[in-house]
Image (cartoon, grey):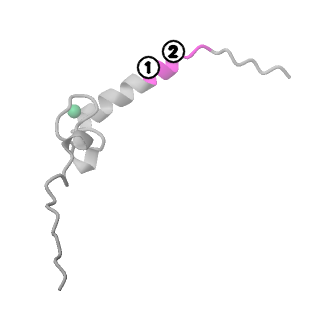
Amino acid sequence: MTDRLFMGNTETIRLSSSLCVRCSAPVKPRFRPFCSARCSQLDLAKWLNESYRIPLEQDDEN
Ligand SMILES: [Zn+2]
């Protein structure tokens, strides 16, 4: 006779992993890891800005 213990799956959902990285709103799968297209575009714009700021320190000495 075997008793099987069913462990409750109470912690299956982790909210911390599904929050927008910009505004902490619930993420929509379509815009992961953001909650909306707006947040996605804002973050992308920030990225582009920072990439433009990168000084050209790499000299091609050839
Ligand atoms: Zn957001």
The reply to whether the magenta stretch includes residue 27 is no
Residue at the image point whose x is 43% and y is 20% from the top:
49
Q: Which mark is residue 17?
A: none
In the rendered image, the vertical position of residue 61 relative to residue 38, given as above or below: above
Q: What residue type is labelled 2?
A: Arg
Magenta segment main secondary structure:
helix
In the rendered image, the vertical position of residue 43 relative to residue 15, given as above or below: above
Which quarter of the image is occupied by the N terminus?
bottom left
Q: How far is mark 2 from mark 1, CA to CA?
A: 6 Å
Secondary structure of the residue carrying tag 2 is: helix
Q: Tell me: 6 left or right of 48.
A: left
Relative image position of residue 23 (x, y in whole percent):
21, 28
Relative image position of residue 5 (x, y in whole percent):
16, 70
Please tell me how crowded label 1 is: few (under 14), some (14-19), or many (20+) other residues with Cα within 10 Å: few
- Report the residue marked by disc 1: 49
Residue at the image point whose x is 19% and y is 82% from the top:
2
Residue at the image point whose x is 46% and y is 19% from the top:
50
The reply to whether the magenta stretch includes residue 53 is yes
In the rendered image, the vertical position of residue 30 relative to residue 35, given as above or below: below
Figure quadrant, ligand 1: top left
Which residue occupies the foreground of this view, 51 or 21? 21
* Region of the chain picked out in magenta, as a range: 48-55
Which residue occupies the foreground of this view, 23 or 7? 7
Relative image position of residue 17 (x, y in whole percent):
26, 42
Q: Which amino acid does label 1 sit on?
A: Asn
**Snapshot quadrant of residue 35:** top left
Which quarter of the image is occupied by the C terminus?
top right
- Report the residue marked by disc 2: 53
Relative image position of residue 54 (x, y in whole percent):
55, 17
Q: Tell me: 59 left or right of 16.
A: right
